[in-house]
Image (cartoon, coloured by chain):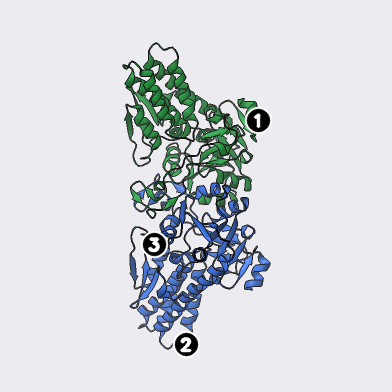
Chain colours: A green, B blue
Amino acid sequence: MKLTDQKIRAIKWENDFLYLLDQRLLPNQEVYVQFTSSRNVADAIRDMVVRGAPAIGITAAYAVVLSAQSHRDLPNWREAVLDDIEILQNSRPTAVNLAWALTRMRKRLLAEMTDPVNDLLQEAQTIHQEDVTANYHMAKAGAAFLVPGSRVLTHCNTGALATGGYGTALGVIRRAWEKGKLERVYADETRPWLQGSRLTAWELQQEGIPTTLICEGAAASLMRQQRVDWVIVGADRIVANGDVANKIGTYSLAVLARQHGVKFMVVAPNSTVDMTIGKGSDIPIEFRSAEELIKIGEIQVGVTNIDAWNPAFDITPSELIDCIVTETAVIECPNRERMRATFR
Amino acid sequence: MKLTDQKIRAIKWENDFLYLLDQRLLPNQEVYVQFTSSRNVADAIRDMVVRGAPAIGITAAYAVVLSAQSHRDLPNWREAVLDDIEILQNSRPTAVNLAWALTRMRKRLLAEMTDPVNDLLQEAQTIHQEDVTANYHMAKAGAAFLVPGSRVLTHCNTGALATGGYGTALGVIRRAWEKGKLERVYADETRPWLQGSRLTAWELQQEGIPTTLICEGAAASLMRQQRVDWVIVGADRIVANGDVANKIGTYSLAVLARQHGVKFMVVAPNSTVDMTIGKGSDIPIEFRSAEELIKIGEIQVGVTNIDAWNPAFDITPSELIDCIVTETAVIECPNRERMRATFR
């Protein structure tokens, strides 16, 4: 489970610079973009060169190293790095892993250091490595819920591309496949960004896991025809009462799952848990442009100058969730009391 | 409400030939394709040059005229036309309006005729005109349910492009707008064919009706935030127990609407009603290729060689429908008894 053992690596630190696999170009092109400045990384997070809550946290941690590297000869270099951390922090609002990783990097920055750039790099690599390790733990715990022959519906991409490696919800799916428990994965294409058809299908295809693509509108029929046993998704933020922010469309699946007797699992590392927020409706939700709906790449697919309501995330209330799986805990039927008992 | 008064005309008979506005190219290009042969029209229906249950019925009726025109000098011309009717019949399986219109044309064909081509043309034009008239009746009856300030979510395209003119569900929305009852339309983009962002948004924009585009995954959040009062959709087939086949994604909206206290209206002409089928699960559902999900125009958006589950339609059970509106009837809380009482 070393970083370099991962087959798919969305985030690499090599020769003193950060490299991101440009997820906007997948699956048509596999292009790594080199980053030398923290500000460019902040733009890349906003523009979704990299996406997925854990992946943007790890990326931001490496960006802090780039910032220290650029500014180390300045007398007030720490201030400059803190400014860059602030900019990184504001690149995307909903996923809390970003704030979590930056808090860790800030703490390291303000502590005693012998070789600042190297010490910060070590911290970023630790965050990265811990994420991969966490994913293996979650995968094991989550897959334990599945029985042989399970059919799983997943949404968005929660795999190696969305994390340090292996994946959260997709890690559970990978593990279930390895253990012979998985009959088929249904992947929601996940509009508007098509993470399902571009990224999840791409990851699953590489491992030969039987995958069927559907559009979001087909999920209800699929469930009604009893072709799904579990919906398994990731999370961008899990708050004190067990409500979950995740990719737009998740809440819809949760309502439909409950209606059709399908189980619903959320898989995310502890760094996704934010006990400072009481309930889902208080989570800041990022709204993105109408362009995302009416253009695909450079192609205009819909009418121009149309208003769109394009929240990137939605809130799934804890009542609709059968279990939340993190690297240290499994919370069945999550609620405020169970969350508090686990995460204090 | 004459055919030629319609602002948007998807289907035109001019100078002895049929012209279809190529809906695959909208909204980027407005191109009319000329048809001189019935077989080419059957291909065009299959390839969705024209779509929408009432529109394909009307189109097929005109195709029968083309067939008669091509074959009128043959001794066995009626046989040749019957063969073409058979091919048209098989072009798309789910919408029953196609079968309904062809049954009417077949009946006319087999009856006494003085001038076959002209007599058949008259029948096709009558079907077309009746559809427009029906739409105005439905619009009035459906809009009567709405109160001022209504926010409506619609799915797919049910407007002038999907019918002889004015529209079914979109006819209700047009009428509500004309009567000052409509605050806003939310249009589901409607994957995979994007009828919402390409066609519905295009129609509504031309009339200045306030329209907001959403992706299917956002509908549940929109309802949870109490931004929708009614879901109003069309139908491809309504069967004896009140179950409705309509564009994939409709059933999902019906479940979500019920869950969130949003009303659900189905608007379709009597020609959509098929009392020979007892329940929704017996309606033949058309499955389309994976290509529709992973390619947009010529652009590859997802991975290649992926399996997809791509039903073009789903079934909404009558229990989730608040009212069905046709040109002659309004059936509230539809069920087998009420359907039988209305349509015998």
Q: Nearest the camera: B97 or B334?
A: B334
Q: Residue flagged by tag 1: what amino acid is it?
A: Arg
Q: Outermost residue toward the bottom?
A: B114
| Res B118 visible | yes
Q: Is residue A89 left or right of residue A258?
A: left
Q: Secondary structure at mark 2?
A: loop
Residue A262 falls in image quadrant? top right
Mark nearest the camera among 1 and 2 is 1
Q: Distance from label 3 to label 2 (Cα)? A: 36 Å
Q: Position of residue B1 (x, y in %)?
A: 46, 75
The residue pinned by badge 2 equals B112
Q: Residue flagged by tag 3: what amino acid is it?
A: Gln
Q: Position of residue A8 (x, y in %)?
A: 41, 32
Q: Residues within 10 Å of mark 2 (few under 14, many from 20)?
A: few
Name the chain letter of the residue that bears numbered label 3.
B
The residue pinned by badge 1 equals A338
Q: Position of residue B243 (x, y in %)?
A: 60, 62
**Contact? badges 3 and 1 (CB < 8 Å):** no
